[in-house]
Amino acid sequence: MNRATIEEKILLALKEDFEIENPDLNQNLVELYEFDSIDAINLLGTIEETFSLSEPLTIEEEREAMTLFMDKCTIVQLVDYIETLIQKKKQA
């Protein structure tokens, strides 16, 4: 899956699940959209479902994601994280 497809799927999920339309890819989701820990958990579930990961996320991967999501996360960083995660799961 290429980066453009990942970005498109994340933007669709943000629109459908969080009512975030046409976001700037470099804006902070936490500050701009008041993205909180419950949103982060929901987004994590959406990522697992949307990207049909071959294996469930490990506790370590979930912690890493939550840290990213709650620490000045931008859509660009989110796409970077998912790209890395997909590659990691393919290699496993």
Image (cartoon, helix red, strand yellow):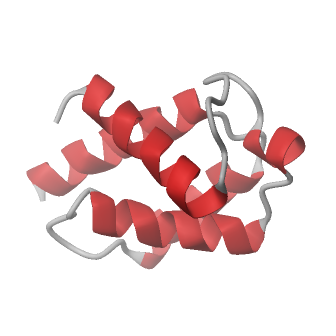
- Residue plotted at (68% across, 67% down): 39
Q: Quadrant of the C terminus?
A: bottom left
Left or right position of 23 against 61: right
Residue 66: x %, y % from top left = 63, 62
Residue 70: x %, y % from top left = 75, 54
Q: Tell me if residue 23 comes above or below residue 63 in the rendering.
A: above
Viewer-closest of 54 and 39: 39
Left or right position of 2 against 7: left
- Residue plotted at (52% across, 57% down): 16
- Residue plotted at (27% across, 32% down): 5
Number of callouts in the render?
Answer: 0
Q: Quadrant of the N terminus?
A: top left
- Residue plotted at (52% across, 40% down): 78
Q: Tell me if residue 63 comes above or below residue 35 in the rendering.
A: below
Left or right position of 81 against 6: right
Left or right position of 24 against 59: right
Residue 89: x %, y % from top left = 19, 56
Viewer-closest of 38 and 86: 38
